[in-house]
Image (cartoon, rainbow, N blue to C red):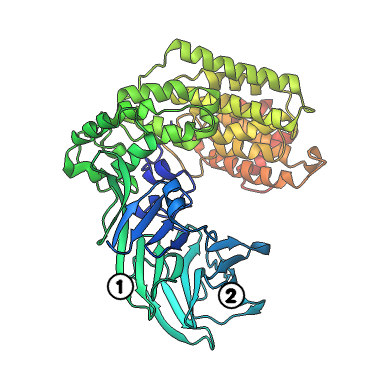
Amino acid sequence: MGMKNSAAVLILLLVAGPSAHAGREATDWDVLPDFNEINFTTASVGFADPGGVYFVFDREARAFSRVPEKEYRRLMPVSAGPARKAGADGAVLLQASDGTVLEAGDAYCSEGVDQKHWLKLGGEPLKDHVRPCVSVSAAEMTDGRLWLGTRGDGEYGERPASGIVVQSAADGSLIKTISDKEGLSGNLVRVIRADPFSRRVWSATHLGLSELSAAGEVLSSWYLYEDLDGNGLPAVMLSTAPRRTNFLAVLQRKLGPKDPAAFVEAVRKIPPEIRDCLGPDGRRWDCRYGGSAGGDRFLPEEFNVLVPFVVEAADFSPDNVWMTYFRLCMFGDKGVAGLLAEKYVDAAVATRTGSLATQCLYDYRQAGLLKEKPPEATVKAALGRVSRALARLNALGPDGGHMEIFEAHGVAVEGADALAEIGSPKGIELLNRYFIRSKGGVNDPDALMFDGAAQTLHHRDDFLPGAMAGIEKFYGAPIVQGCMFLDLTYPDGTKKNRLGAAQLRSLVIAVENASHPEYIPHQPSQAEGAYSACRQAALSQMKVPSVREEFYRSVYPALSPAQRKTADLLAAGLPL
């Protein structure tokens, strides 16, 4: 099996889902509340997060308390709703507390796109002092001043920007910029609101809350973090100084253990000096404490005391299986490895987890935590699913429903790959026999499945018979991946059986077929891609003297005249 890169598991995904940070580097604040409402009474200031976190600031005590939603709604007036709402044609509406509504277009200067932000008031463009490639995320109007919150947007999602820009509402002149350098809690601003009961302005950012004077001076800031409270339960808290989130607390919140006290007791068994190994990027790359089977592939073995709680929360249903694998794959534990290997052959698992589960099982195998041979009952059940999927393809034929064919492809190919991942080649052997017996052609269900199989199984030497059969009998785009399976332009020592006279024979046939666009009457241009890929693969084999000699000695005489001509042109390095 080909070498794969061992990847760190992102705790951010564990706690917030696959799209939480859209590919950028994970940070502590990804799991913090996103306050988008600030409300006022004579006695308190309230902050609401759409995810269900509510804080109330007591003016007299100058202290925060977290309250349930019901209590928050009792204490606070009826909310005007989020300060930022969707507008027409992709614009957003930023409503100030005095009723002023700004229309805004977000910036996006990434991936070759140069989209500047824009603002309108009453349908007319409004001049502002926010940097062009920064979005305006919030707005407030007070004492003739327009306060604009900022947010960076790009290929990898949102990021901190410039804090707050204050300008004259009359002539648009810049008054001041307020950022973390001036004491603001953060530079990605969620909401700004003027306090109607005092000459104060409040802001909520990605890191916390700030109280400012009407002149824009930061009076106080509080910083959000999550930790275990006095009862050992996870809670979002505020501090007057920045504090790191305890990701063990985040993990407890998401797992929801039946016995929270037992979870806390287990956490206490993890040495304090290594608890930070669980950070915003999962198992931190600089965490080299050793002892864990598999070295740096998993959390240190001291974290395995948490395994029972993660297994207890495991949900292998189709909608939740990805997250379950994500959580469990952090732990270098034999029991976990066996459980995930057993579940991996289920139809939903392979298709819903993709490379995550494949990489995970590869790491377990490399660490010696996975048995060499899976249980026979597991193999038998998985083979049954692959076999039934292939039989269904046969029954559907070329006129079958698109979704039915697609689903059968996924079950058959991913199921065969799953079996190989846990140590059984029998699923791939079924696929090989299927493609060898296939009638061939272009763009029928078998050809389309071959395309996916050759790509998915590219690192599986066991797929060689199927790859050779497929490139000989299918036409057009579906054979590109099959020819790449045999392409040795860039040699890979992990691929043991790709080079040989028989392999070259299959490639010669594929090249000859691809030189006939008429074989693909509905889209002859497909032949160009197939010809290019297969010719390159054939040349990579033809240039090896031992292969070329064996090919001309034992294979060449039995080829058709057209195929021999193709072989000769390849040997001479000439196009057909």
Is residue 350 depicted above or below 437 in this figure? below
Q: Where is residue 406 in the image (x, y as percent from the top left)?
A: 67, 31
Q: In this view, does 180 lie to the left or right of 287?
A: right
Picture residue at 29% right of the left edge, 64% below the top: 60
Q: Where is residue 381 in the image (x, y as percent from the top left)?
A: 52, 14
**Residue 508 shows which numbered tag?**
none
Q: Which amino acid does label 2 sit on?
A: Leu
Q: Could you tell me if residue 139 is visible in this image? A: yes
Q: What residue type is labelled 1?
A: Leu
List the residue tagged with mark 2: 119
Q: In which quarter of the image is residue 412?
A: top right
Q: Is residue 92 left or right of residue 194?
A: right
Give the CA separation, mark 2 to mark 1: 29 Å
Q: Looking at this view, is 206 or 97 the one in front?
A: 97
Q: N-terminal of the two: label 2 or label 1?
A: 2
Is residue 111 depicted above or below 67 in this figure? below
Q: Is residue 140 left or right of residue 515?
A: left
Q: Position of residue 111 (x, y in %)?
A: 54, 62
**Residue 219 shows which numbered tag?**
1
Q: Looking at this view, is 339 or 129 the one in front?
A: 129
Q: Looking at this view, is 168 or 542 the one in front?
A: 168
Is residue 441 depicted above or below 489 in this figure? above
Q: How crowded is mark 1: few (under 14 residues within 10 Å), some or many (20 or more)?
A: some
Q: Position of residue 32 (x, y in %)?
A: 38, 52
Contact flag, marks 2 and 1 (Cβ < 8 Å): no
